[in-house]
Amino acid sequence: MIPQPTAHQALADQTFALASDATIGAAGPALQQIAEQLATQLRRSTGFALPVQDGAGTITLAQNGPDELGAEGYELRADTDGVTITAATSEGVFRGVTTLRQLLPAKAHADSPQEGPWEVTGTTITDSPRYSYRGMMLDVSRHFFTLDQVKHVIDLISLYKVNHLHLHLSDDQGWRIQVDSWPNLTEHGGSTQVGGGEGGYYTKAEYAELVQYASDRYITVVPEIDTPGHTNAALSSYPELNKGDLPPSLYTETEVGFSSFTIDKDVTYEFLDDVFREVAEQTPGDLLHLGGDEAHSTEHSEYLTFVAKATELVVKHGKRVMGWHEVADGPLPAGSVVQYWGTEDPKAQVLAQKAVEQGATLVLSPANRSYLDMKYDAETPLGLDWAGLVSVEQSYSWNPATLVPGVPASAIDGVEAPLWTETVDDVSKIEYLVFPRLPGIAELGWSAESALDWASYRDRLAEQGSRWEVLGVNFYRAPEIDWR
Ligand code: TNX
């Protein structure tokens, strides 16, 4: 299993076997929706009818505690008579179902009927996460990815109990979310991407569908509008946002740090007020990410002024601020979340400490560990290497609680693995960089510190490979792992 659960115990001489007359029992709409999702998948692979019924079934999902396992915790019991998943919340039940999917044979992930048996070795599991934030970021700006492509990513990451999807929705190369009050952002600013392809954007209806799809899998979407740098697409769409009123051309290469909003113009904040309002309206989650990274073309004192004003606008629209660690140099509103993307750079560490001194909490995305766009090794055809080569072991073998000196363990909300897409333009390339590294980051976010062990993880990861084969995932067969 990945992530490794808090506690599990084998039940001697007990095996559950899913049979053709099995049922799935669940009470209430939320659990019945989870039951239907499970049934839909298992109907495809087993060919069984698997009716979902009210109350108990062969597999029973129940929302009657235990409270002490928290919002996402659950208990699972599989024995000769059936499977029971119990949690205090529907979210906890959902996490338990992802565990059941991993306990079933790999062929249960198939999309056409397979031969049984469909056995689960008898077990009891008690499980709850170490951290509340376990995320992946997808950069849909450098290259655009369609709704179906993002849904596919959601399906895959939800298997590893990831609960946040951070979407990097704007950058120099493209603006990807419809904003009614500033329509040229998408019409013009969304019309290309790295390499000069046609780009694209999500309409409000599409974006709402995406947020709902994620939410049905208990994943919160965190939208990012990157500011004040990484803004060429916006600057190119609206002349008035520029210093000299002359808009730059659209940009299809991969340099960073050359664009900036105009800090001393009122229109900059009128614009952000509108954008944050419309994005916040489409965000059921409480976080709105305003970027703040690599503002190399913004004078530093102006950058600090900008952070104060822009964060206020996020709060005005009812969201907590999330930002890359550079924002910690400016004043942060209460409840802010700072995303650390440093390596061993003391400057980044000081900013992380500054964030905590201001009362912010941290999500950790150390570039030399968690960046999914870094090459695995010198031969990896895709990806970048500015933060070093990131092997599977390198991405797994670190402790979030002690990563940043001077930052107390209590300030850590969790971890996130970002996929920047300068070199990534289709789903098979996403899969290649995400798998097998993402499950390791997900385990660092979920499993107890005492459970983190490379030898054990390596062995468990090898078994996941057979699942990705069934799912048709183009994973990197890292030579560090003895794939089965
Ligand atoms: C740095 S990390 C960036 C991105 C790039 C990425 C490539 C960060 C907050 N900004 O703009 O895409 O490196 O790895």
Image (spheres, rainbow, N blue to C red):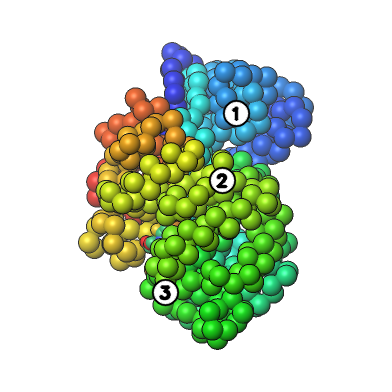
Q: Nearer the viewer, mark 3 or mark 1?
A: 3
Determine the image quadrant of residue 43. Answer: top right
Q: Position of residue 390 (x, y in %)?
A: 28, 52
Residue type (three-letter) at the residue carrying disc 1: Ala
Between 218 and 303, which is closer to the camera in this rendering? 303
Q: Position of residue 120 (x, y in %)?
A: 49, 27
Quadrant of the rendering where the N terminus is positioned: top left
Please tell me which residue is depicted at 33% across the width and 31% down the height of the picture: 452
Quadrant of the rendering where the C terminus is positioned: top left
Q: Is residue 193 above or below residue 397?
A: below
Compare marks 3 and 2 and give the one earlier in the sequence. 3
Please tell me which residue is depicted at 43% across the width and 52% down the height of the picture: 329
Compare marks 3 and 1 and give the one earlier in the sequence. 1
Determine the image quadrant of residue 97. Answer: top right
- Is residue 244 found left or right of 279 in the rendered image? left
Between 427 and 443, which is closer to the camera in this rendering? 443
Residue designated by label 1: 71
Which residue of the protein is positioned furthest toward the left in this rendering? 378
Please tell me which residue is depicted at 65% across the width and 41% down the height of the picture: 37
